[in-house]
Image: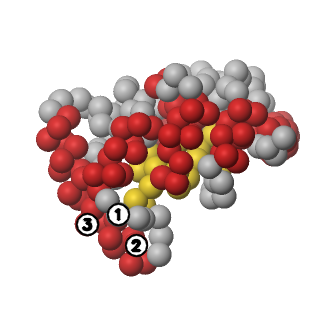
Amino acid sequence: MYTYWPCEFTDLDKDAAWARGVESVKRLGHVAQELGIDYCLEVVNRFETNILNTTEEGVRYCKDVDCKSVKLLLDTFHMNIEEDDLPGAILTAGDYLGHLHVGEGNRKLPGQGHLPWKEIGNALNQIGFDKAVVMEPFVTMGGQVGKDIKVWRDLSGGADEKEMDAQIRQSLAFLKNAFKGE
């Protein structure tokens, strides 16, 4: 919504693309504000865009837009690639964090990788985050999204639908426990 995806990296004039994006998002952000909704911009890794790759860039972009309804969507998969400190990035986002996607750095369900979920939960609690958290694992091949995000092998371990449902329930329980804030 602030640039195009998938990015072909043909226009690497980041300053010009940033300025065009800020101008457009500012107009759309005010429409969103009139409708009482948040307009969340996803911060993604360098392999998918050259505009917003870190939370720090995202906050700076939101400040340039200067519209209360314009927020950030952080995604732990992308953060794992670009951020030195995931909980620190969440603290940097603060009130600008409007939505969170969760998944491991290997695209699997939370709890099936190495990310510091308890520390992520503590950071969310510190900023008083009370908005949506959406799991966004990609564990099977196929379809346009699978091609776009480069899922070239079965990451589910051959799980059938019933097994995947059980894994999702386990992951949800894992996240709820990690995000308790204890």
Asked whether disc 2 touches disc 3, contact meaning CB atoms under 8 Å apart, the reply is no
Q: Is residue 111 visible?
A: yes
Q: Is residue 89 left or right of residue 42?
A: right
Above or below 92: residue 62: below
Could you tell me if the residues under marks 1 and 2 are in contact, i.e. CB atoms within 8 Å?
yes
- Residue in the image at 44% along x and 45% along y: 42
Give the CA distance from mark 2 to mark 3. 10 Å
Mark 3: secondary structure: helix
Residue sticking out furthest to the bottom? 34
Q: Residues within 10 Å of mark 2 (few under 14, many from 20)?
A: some
Dot 2 or dot 3, earlier in sequence: 3
Q: Tell me the number on the disc at residue 67.
A: 1
Question: In the figure, residue 101 lies in which quadrant?
Answer: top right
Residue at label 2? 33
Residue at the image position 71 percent from the left and 32 percent from the top = 119
In the structure shown, which secondary structural element does the residue marked by tag 2 occupy?
helix
Mark with earlier residue (1, 2):
2
- Circle number at residue 27: 3
- Comparing 161 with 49, the one in front is 49
In x, y percent, where is residue 124? 66, 45
Q: Mark 1: which amino acid?
A: Cys
